[in-house]
């Protein structure tokens, strides 16, 4: 971490603390907020208002680092494992706590419970997550996006409906081919393809549609739209163009 970053003050990804609070909850809120967001750093030994480097007493720095690590690991659910290090700035020692963005959201302070102990980062501040945000975090933590969730948990789709979608997708792909080589690469789709792509969920021997299945067939979700994106290469770093699908009908 460079001095200029600290001198710029607190931000979405940076929190400054002059001292180590007696009660760890005072910085634990920021820990879970970073884990619920894009990650961040807490620097102890910096005055947050003036950005003055006051440092941490060198004779206690290792004990303090161990205490911070233990407090974070013991106070949060799911467990958050911080990266705690020290650095020398203007001949003074500061402690840097790095929190990675978490994948098991929501993270919260165990003693306060999920509803009251979940926090998020908003610019340079840490705020309690309201019920709507909490629900979004739970959704993110389930590793399922909107198109891969049940559209109708109690309404299975028939083999005929599945076969119809597979056939439509196959024909659509064939229409996009220009060369014989491209045509040779097109394969007939199966239920297993739709399951692996998140279009169907198999449960108790039946197949249930996800929102993706609905969007690709009847598209009865008036609030939803489909956009196809074009990127340069295969890593999606460079965006080129996008095109929306017809909102009033299925993609095909």
Image (cartoon, rainbow, N blue to C red):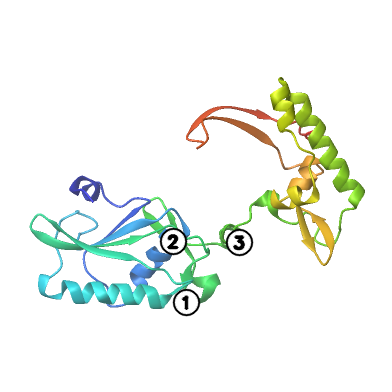
Q: Is residue 76 left or right of residue 223?
A: left
Whether residue 164 appears in this view of the structure is: yes
Q: Would residue 162 be found to the left or right of residue 193 on screen?
A: right
Q: Which residue is labeled 1 in the image?
A: 110
- Separation of disc 2 and disc 3 at Cα? 15 Å
2 or 1: tag closer to the N-terminus: 2
Q: Which residue sits at x=9%, y=54%?
A: 90
Q: Look at mark 2 in the image and give the residue it sits on.
A: 35
Is the residue under label 3 in contact with that under label 2 (CB below 8 Å)? no
Front residue of this view, candidates 166 and 34: 166
Residue 206, percent from left and from top? 85, 61
The secondary structure type at the circle numbered 3 is loop
Upstream in sequence: badge 3 or badge 1: 1
Asked which secondary structure carries label 1, the reply is helix
Q: Is residue 17 visible?
A: no
202 in relation to 23, above or below: above
Report whether 249 appears left or right of 138.
Answer: right
At 44% from the left and 72% from the top, the residue drawn is 79
Q: Residue at x 19, y 54 (%)?
A: 51
Residue labelled with disc 3: 142
In three-dimensional space, the C-alpha distance between marks 2 and 1, rounded to whole angstroms, equals 14 Å
């Amino acid at each position: 971490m460079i001095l200029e970053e600290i001198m710029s003050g607190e931000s979405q990804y940076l929190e400054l603390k002059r001292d180590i609070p007696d009660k760890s909850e005072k910085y634990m809120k920021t820990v879970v907020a970073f884990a619920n967001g894009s990650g961040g750093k807490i620097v102890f030994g910096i005055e947050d208002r003036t950005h003055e480097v006051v440092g941490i007493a060198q004779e206690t720095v290792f004990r303090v680092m161990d205490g911070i690590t233990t407090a974070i690991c013991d106070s949060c659910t799911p467990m958050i494992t911080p990266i705690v290090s020290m650095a020398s700035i203007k001949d003074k020692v500061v402690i840097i706590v790095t929190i990675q963005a978490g994948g098991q959201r929501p993270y919260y302070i165990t003693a306060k419970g999920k509803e009251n102990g979940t926090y998020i980062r908003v610019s340079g501040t840490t705020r309690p997550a309201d019920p709507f945000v909490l629900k979004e975090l739970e959704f993110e933590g389930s590793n399922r996006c909107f198109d891969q969730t049940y559209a109708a948990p109690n309404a299975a789709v028939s083999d005929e409906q599945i076969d119809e979608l597979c056939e439509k997708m196959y024909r659509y792909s064939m229409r996009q081919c220009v060369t014989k080589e491209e045509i040779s690469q097109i394969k007939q789709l199966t239920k297993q393809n739709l399951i692996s792509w998140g279009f169907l969920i198999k449960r108790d021997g039946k197949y249930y549609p996800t929102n993706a299945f609905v969007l690709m067939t009847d598209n009865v979700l008036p609030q939803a739209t489909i956009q196809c994106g074009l990127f340069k290469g295969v890593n999606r770093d460079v965006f080129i163009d996008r095109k929306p699908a017809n909102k009033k009908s299925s993609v095909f």
